[in-house]
Structures are given as C-alpha cells and as structure tokens.
Image (spheres, rainbow, N blue to C red):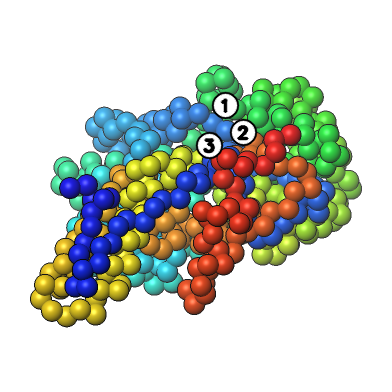
Amino acid sequence: SNKYQKKHTFKNGSDLHTLGTCVNMLNPDAIFSNNEMSLSDIEIYGFDYDYTLVFYSKHLHTLIFNAARDLLINEHRYPAEIRKYDYDPNFAIRGLHYDVHRALLMKIDAFHYIQLGTVYRGLSVVPDEEVIAMYDGSHVPLEQMSDFYGKVKPQTQFMDIFSLPEMTLLSCVNEYFLKNNIDYEPVHLYKDVKDSIRDVHIKGIMYRAIEADIEKYICYAEQTRAVLAKLADHGKKMFLITNSPSSFVDKGMKFIVGKDWRDLFDVVIVQADKPNFFNDKRRPFRKVNERGVLLWDKIHKLQKGQIYKQGNLYEFLKLTGWRGSKVLYFGDHIYSDLADLTLKHGWRTGAIIPELRSEIKIMNTEKYIQTMTWLQTLTGLLEHMQVHRDPDSQMILEEWKKERKEMREINRNFFNAQFGSLFRTDENPTYFLRRLSRFADIYMASLSCLLNYEPDYTFYPRRTPLQHELPGWSDQLCTGTFRIPFLQETVQIK
C-alpha cells in the first residue's frame, strides 16, 4: 500500500492519516535573510568577481579537474593511469570536510557530528561501524576542525565553488591507489592535489582558457549587467575586490558589461590576496596601468576608472572613508569573503549560493513534500508512542525506526546520492549552514535575485521557533500570515 496514505491503528483504535501538505512553494529567485536589513541604509555595494559578478558554466569544473589531473601526472609524477578518471559533477557538494590523515571526505553537522552514510574513502562509502570505530563515535572535536582560513588541521573544509573539482580529484586519486593496493601517504596526496589545483589558477591555465573562449565559460552576463545598471541608476557606489588578475577581470567585465565597465565602479582591486587583504595592514595599493604594468607611485586616493593591485582593507577604509553598515559586500566564499567583514568591520554581507536554486526546486516537488511530511509524521509517532512498553508496540516502533532510516536515505538522494543537501544532515543544519547563518546577513542563488527587490526594501528574517517556543508563532506557512518569499506572491519585479 502507498506509504503516504498509510494508516496505523493504535490501541485506542484511532486512525492517523498523513497531514495535508502545504500548497505554498518557495521561490528559487528570492533573497533569504538571517538578519534584518534595509537596503535603504546601503549606499555602497561591493562585489567579489568569480561566482559573484561572473557566473561560470559547468565546463569550467571539467577544465580545472583535467588540468590539475594532468599536472599531477606531469609535474608530480603520479601514475598516468589516473587519466582514466573524468570529472563527475554529481559526486561532491560544497561544505564537506576532509580528514587529511585518513583520506576521508564527509559531511559534518552544526554540532560537529559526522552524518553517517556520507563518509567516503575514494569513491566508496565507508560502513557506519567502521566510522564509529575510527572516531570513537561520530563526533569530531573542535580542535580537529579547520579554522576559518582552512589552515591544515586534521580536518579541512572545502568552502568555495572552485573546490568541487578539487574534492572530486582527491577522491579519484585515492580510489586509484586503494584499488591498486598502492601504499601512499594521504597527507602528501592532499598537498599535491591542493598544489595542482592552485597551479591551474597561478600558472594562468584557467585564465587563458576562459579568455580564449569566453562565451563557452561565462553565463548569465545580461543579468549581472542589469543588476549593476539598476544600482547605478539609483546612485549607488560600487566596488570590486578580487583575487583574480587584472587582464582576466577586464576581459570578463568587457564581455558582461561592455568596454566602459569601469565607469560603474568607484574602486577596482585585483590580485587582492583575500583573506589576507582583510587582515594584513602592511601591503600598500599599487596602480596598474592599461598594459597591466605595476606603477610605483604612492597612492593617496583611489580613483574611479583606475585598477589597483594588492593593498589591504585598513588602507581601503582610510582612503574611501566607507564605514560599516552603509556597505553591503557580496561573495561566494563564506570565510574568505564574508567572515572578517562582518566580525571586524560591521559591513553587511550577502552570500551567493548557486546551489540554493536547484535545492529549492527539489523542495517544491510533490515527491519531496510527501516524503518530508511522512518523515515528520513518523518522527512524531516515534516520540509519542515510545512510552508503550508491550511487545506489540515495541515491534511497531522498531518497524517505524527502520522505515524512518529508509525515508531519510530517500530524502538525501533527492539532492545528491552521496552527500545529500548542502544545508541539512538528516535533522540538523550542516556545519556549512551554521557558518552561513553567522557570517551572511542575506543569501541568494545569484546576484540577479536583487532585480526582484526595490532599492529600499527591508529584509525581515522569519521568526523560527526555539525548541521551547510554540510553533504557532512561526509555523503559519500555510496561512500566509508571514511574508515568506513564496512563488505566488513574488515581490513586485521592477
């Protein structure tokens, strides 16, 4: 019989029918807020470049994977057979942790617990019992977790979108060594893969490939152009801080906006070396001329239409006078783009999370809604019925536990067969989401979501109930009492 119509008869003979599901659908193009913020207070908009102003097609990850794999073979003398591995875009998700010494890729929740069933050695899942034996349970102590800047501790976290090919390459090479019984040191492998991925950027392999075929790699240019034009029309100041080199940014922005792109920006900073840019007070700015040559003049003022290199945030604040909550900065890397800005400087922050769009589309499907509704119902049943100690009740409870485990697996597979959703483990928020909630005032799938809101719009986070509060105050999703970004009432598009 269909699980979703399933009835269970209790001792008192009452039937339980599955709850009716809500008809509201979430809008994938909405902006979600962790913290109340009014755009009318924002005078200055700042942007990272890669995956914020510019969005790349799926071809880029394949390019990075292949180039890094070839560097491993040619520069680091890895076996040529690893060339048989191709990039699989559906293997990894962002925000995973990697145990450098044990060569394990895994998903960790907000409380530092490993989500069992999401621990991978190479391309194969590690059985739960083995994970529990290795970690004496499934908790990872705080001192083993990498800090904000991913200094290599036993666990390192992959936070930016560029790390997807890195995780996949790491897993493929691990797989090759394991399958062929080759004795290797996981720490060296981690370092070699990290260096190869870095070299794809530093040696200019990626930059040259994109510049040579810009239309293949850059997507949604017209939406970025529309966002920047809208902000300029409303008299907002704009700046750009990126780690990418000047000619690369110039070519990309010419493609996206046009040759006069610099007129839109009050300040443009390239090769900023974030996150050091936000912390190191010593490095002065250098001017870059039209031919990309570095000039030696002392910088007394950051001029519009000019490109600067290096520098640091303290100098930037001194030269511009832009302070705190008037500034809203967008980036895709929660640590190196947003953490310091919000913690030390009081800037408002916007995280760009492209995965949000596809996850919301999945959450809007009938299948997902039905599975989630039944899962919540099952959990409620387990909670209320556990007091019945007789053998029949205990047998039913065991069946429900088994079914709940199966449903959780189905639920995970909706998003990613190996690791599930970016934002949740079975019940808890992921470690990624916890950092996102702390460091981003607002988050959205792409910059184009800004087109749906007036420049004086106020974002109000939903009041989600604490465990000791009644859900009634916030769970009025179905009544539409609270303004939630649902599809049928998208904010007026201007």
Residue sitting nearer the eye, 223 or 126: 223
Which corner quadrant holds the C terminus? top right
| Residue 338 shows up from this direction | no
Residues marked 3 and 1 touching at CB (< 8 Å): no
Front residue of 225/386: it is 386
Would you name the residue on which mark 1 appears?
218
Q: CA distance from mark 3 to mark 1?
A: 17 Å
- Mark 1 neighbour density, 10 Å: few (under 14) some (14–19) many (20 or more): many
User: Pointer 2: what residue?
Assistant: 54
* Residue 368 position within the rendered picture, expressed as x and y whole percent measured from the top left: 37, 46
The picture places residue 171, in percent across and down from the top left corner, at 31, 45
Q: Amino acid at mark 1?
A: Ile
Q: In the rendered image, which residue does mark 3 sit on?
A: 201
Where residue 257 sits, quadrant-wise, is top right
Query: Where does residue 408 sit, x and y in percent of width and height?
Result: 29, 55
Residue, far front: 13
| Circle on res. 52 | none
> Residue 478's spot in the image, x, y percent?
51, 53
Alpha carbon separation for disc pair 2 and 3? 16 Å
The residue located at (73%, 62%) in the rendering is: 346
